[in-house]
Image (cartoon, coloured by chain):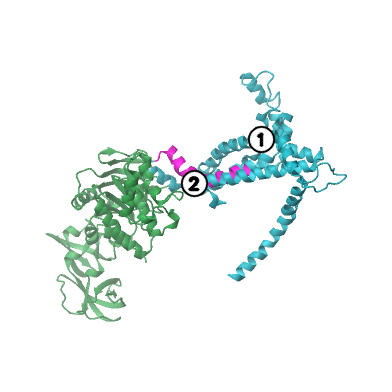
Amino acid sequence: MRKHGKVGYLLLIPGMIWLILFFVIPFYSLVATSLYDPNGSVFAGYEMTWEFSNYVHALEDYWQPLLRSFLYAGLATLFCLVLGYVLAYAIAFKAGRWKNLMLVLVIAPFFTSFLVRTLSWKLILADDGLIVNTLQFLHILSQDGRLLATPVAVIAGLTYNFLPFMVLPLFASIDKIDHRLIEAGGDLYASPFVGFWKVTWPLSLPGVVSGTLLTFIPAAGDYINAELLGSPQQRMVGNVIQNLFTDANNYPAAGALSVILMAIIVVMVLFYVRRAGTEELL
Amino acid sequence: MSQVADPGNATDADGAAGSAGSSGGGSGLELRALTKEFANFTAVKSIDLDVPAGAFFALLGPSGCGKTTTLRMVAGLETPTSGTITLAGQDITFAKPYRRPVNTVFQSYALFPHLDIFENVAFGLRRRKKSDVDQQVNEMLELVELSSQARKKPTQLSGGQQQRVALARALVNHPEVLLLDEPLGALDLKLRRSMQVELKRIQTDVGLTFIHVTHDQEEAMTMADTIAVMNAGVIEQMGAPEELYENPRTTFVANFLGQTNLIEGKITGRSGDQIAVDMHGIGVSVNANRAHTDGGEGWVGIRPEKVLIGDEGESLDAPGNTIPGGVVSDVSFTGVSTTYLVRMPWGQELVVFEQNTGRRKLFRTGDKVELSWRPEYAFLLDRSQDASAGAQTN
């Protein structure tokens, strides 16, 4: 036993070094930056003055993009869940010999870059594009109505970009479900609909939890979709942080906002996982 | 093979099962010309079956014989290609599984891993919006002696306990018919034997119709009132265990249920209820009601424990059929009994099983012996059938 323990610790070392170099040190640096004196500058240097007021100011100034981020990410996650569940269910249970091909198709978009894919949505949702024209023709959209630079475009982009992160864990979970359990549900007087809610859905919950986390967390911090498909009215917290770091050179405010985003996500995830009752799965 | 399972079988066995079942009264399960074809083979070929209410009925056969497919059609998990299924007078051939008063104990138990034992058992009752779920579930858990495990998850239980949960989960719904698909297959031998007794006790207690699918002939014979032996999609023979064992109609049944010696013979005459057979130059006789061939040749069948072994010229209590000229070629002594292999003058080795009562001497390899048996124990089967059909190699 002891010997095995030693080997185990040795095997941990590469990972630990990686984490220290690329997570612990940058995280320390980020938290430290968030507490610097905001009157400093990148060129003049910053002084550590334990400015906790940075956090208060960040929340005061940017609560709107922060809230918007969680709203957009939440909606995108919900749409991903609905679309992804149907897709994953179909691939797992109905695709038969097409199963592997369909899985490849799900991840095929990753073969092109995130930026290119998002930019192509600009064409899809363009003002004189097919979708806008059709919606205008059907009077769902007014004659001068548009989709680009609206929340619809940003949420659609987020949903599209993060859908594979939802489908893959859902598929893994649903594919594992023993068909005999669903048969047993039917044998015990559950109609197909009731059987789904009482057997299939609860057994797929681990996939639902990991899929929603894998979608929601990166979506909440995303800035590409809002940048390319939205307007300043759709700014998400990621855009604000990027702007503070690169254009405004306000490192302390950017750091404080980053830490706030992280903290909120961690609290939400803990709460969510508790509620879902799937702690043992994580 | 299919010519063997004539409809007469079903009618015969119907009578036998009817007398064995406790209630009867035509409210049982009836299968008529039930057939299931898959893409490239026919799993079940037009079978007819009557299971009287209250019976413990076994479908026995080797894997791939169609017994599980038959069971799944009764459960509604497979749709028959043709034929009908009638339960308590109602045609349920195409009824949805969740609308049939039938429950299944699955081979793998198929317990819901996300629910505890109590909720597993309550599942069927809750779906049907029963009012006294708690009381019924608790009573059922008591019956299978698992009351103390009610709040555990299935994975925390042993195989035998899981098996009893699966049984309770099905039984609590009081189905018209309980289907058991190799329910004891995953248990070790000792546990299997005690569960056989337990299942039989529960069936007697609740008085429900049980249909038990198994490939274990000993299990089927221990538990069932009536056994239907299936092979290659047809029912070879149906009847009470003793009847199947003592008077098999086909070589498959003779070999699948226990062991048997099959010796080639020519039919030389029929007089009254006796049939004279010439067995490699030795005349023996067989009762007419145990002869299942019309041809001029047949297999004379005799169970190893019905064969007596003695020294040459020794007179044994088996008037009628004496076969001299045997040489003991193998002796296996197991304490309670001895099994001999005896090479006959025509080259065949016959199996002889003798109880070690202490009154008989032990023979050794190379001893010259004489075999004999009472004519009423022998049976005669169709020569066109494969003498090794259904033989188990274990």
Is there any visible trace of residue B265 in the rendered image? yes
> Is residue A201 found inside the magenta-colored segment of the image?
yes
Residue located beneath label 2 in the image: A203
Relative side of B264 to A33, left or right: left
Badge 1: chain ID: A
* Residue sitting at x 46%, y 47%: A179
The vertical placement of B14 against B378, above or below, is: above
Relative side of A110 to B150, left or right: right
Q: Which residues are magenta?
A: A190-215
Badge 2: chain ID: A
Amino acid type indicated by mark 1? Leu
Rendered hue of chain A is: cyan
**Circle on res. A67:** 1
Relative image position of residue B50 (x, y in whole percent): 25, 47
Amino acid type indicated by mark 2? Leu
Rendered hue of chain B is: green
The vertical placement of A157 against B252, above or below, is: above
Relative image position of residue B215 (x, y in whole percent): 34, 58
**Circle on res. B394:** none
Relative image position of residue A89 (x, y in whole percent): 53, 41
